[in-house]
Image: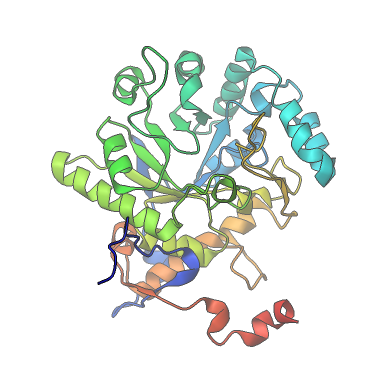
Amino acid sequence: MAAPQFKEMRRCYSFDEVALVPGDTTINPEQVNIDFTLGNFTFPIPILASAMDAVVDPHFAVLLSRLGGLAVLNLEGVQARYQDADEVLAEIAKASDDEITPLLQKVYSAPIKENLIGDRIREIKSNGAVCAVSVTPQNTKRFTPITVEAGIDILVVQSTVTTAHHVSKSYHGLIFSELCQVMPAPIIVGNCVSYSAALNLMRTGISGVLVGVGPGAACTTREVLGVGVPQVTATMDCAAAREQYLRETGRYVAIITDGGIRTGGDLCKAFASGADAVMLGSIFAQAKEAPGRGSHWGMANPHPALPRGTRIKVGTRSTLEQILFGPTSATGGTENLIGALRTAMGMCGALTIKEMQRIEMVIAPAIRTEGKYFQTIKGLS
């Protein structure tokens, strides 16, 4: 008789391991509706830009807002530490691989200047853009009054792993239900990857949940800590929590898949897994307008004692508008992401994102093993 297992594991799936099944009816891509609603805001495209210094500065935030999406500004990054943040970003981009982690630790050891928080928010708002900002849980109480006074539209409370119940030495830590009562703007909280954690967060009254631990291109959390869940499974589990919460309360909380999306195909699979929107980092870091100058690094990379990220050279590909809407001559699915989403929805017979969430998915062999020899032969030689 076999000895019982100490614990059982289930199979989880990433974007490379699944495929979407075409529908019985097809739809003209121009007729599908891809709107994303969060609180009182409706965005024409369901795309957010990650709160990373190499991705979002005030200029980028304004540009993405004009194109229909939402950029999130990191209020604990260089934009809130340095008056001339662009000079610091240039220094980071030029540093060698051996110099970069100590340099980032030094750069991010400078104190956050509260006056710069208000200045950056007002800069975005004065240009007519929707303003979303990101803070970590430990700094939320300190910075929230400043952000409200400056006129933010959406607050993102974000760390590598965020839960509704946190044990600490603080007498009265951050309680999301209390934050929701005093905050006049929608609140997005992340990141999480499980059904129970997502459901508990939703029950606090927040408006959106960021899903993803470890899949980002510049993130090394899986390597350093061993923590994370592949994105397809994580999104499906958190979407199941959204449906359960909707049945309990009649209130809908958005699921936003954050990290691991490299191509239009990955993006489409995120929606089919249950996402209402996606958050993009490395793809946007390649835009000509991105402040990172072709480099990209994660929010946990500058940690003074345990960095969980690395600067990567993503290069500069094309304009933000081309990445989102084309036209493109790139054949790998890295540009015209909105065109890819609309086309996939049309092939699958999904008129709306809600219908896209319900289409059939199958477990599939990695695309490199299925008839793509000539496309991958360079990597084999």
**Residue at 37%, 51% in the rendered image:** 276
**Residue at 61%, 23% in the rendered image:** 120
**Residue at 72%, 58% in the rendered image:** 317
**Viewer-nearest residue: 209 or 323:** 209
Q: The N terminus lies in which quarter of the figure?
A: bottom left
Residue 253 seen from this side: no
Please determine whether, in this image, residue 370 is positioned above or below residue 74. below
**Viewer-nearest residue: 265 or 355:** 265
Residue 325 seen from this side: yes
Residue furthest front in the image: 1
Q: How many marks?
A: 0
Residue furthest left in the image: 248
**Viewer-nearest residue: 364 or 337:** 364
Residue 341: horizontal and vertical position, in percent?
A: 46, 64
**Residue at 53%, 53% in the rendered image:** 215
Q: Quadrant of residue 154?
A: top left
Residue 75: horizontal and vertical position, in percent?
A: 58, 26
Residue 15: horizontal and vertical position, in percent?
A: 47, 65
Q: Quadrant of residue 117?
A: top right
Please determine whether, in this image, residue 129 is positioned above or below residue 145. below
Q: How is the image coloured?
A: rainbow
Q: Is residue 295 left or right of residue 274?
A: right
Q: The C terminus lies in which quarter of the figure?
A: bottom right
Please determine whether, in this image, residue 373 is positioned above or below residue 92. below
Residue 185: horizontal and vertical position, in percent?
A: 38, 26
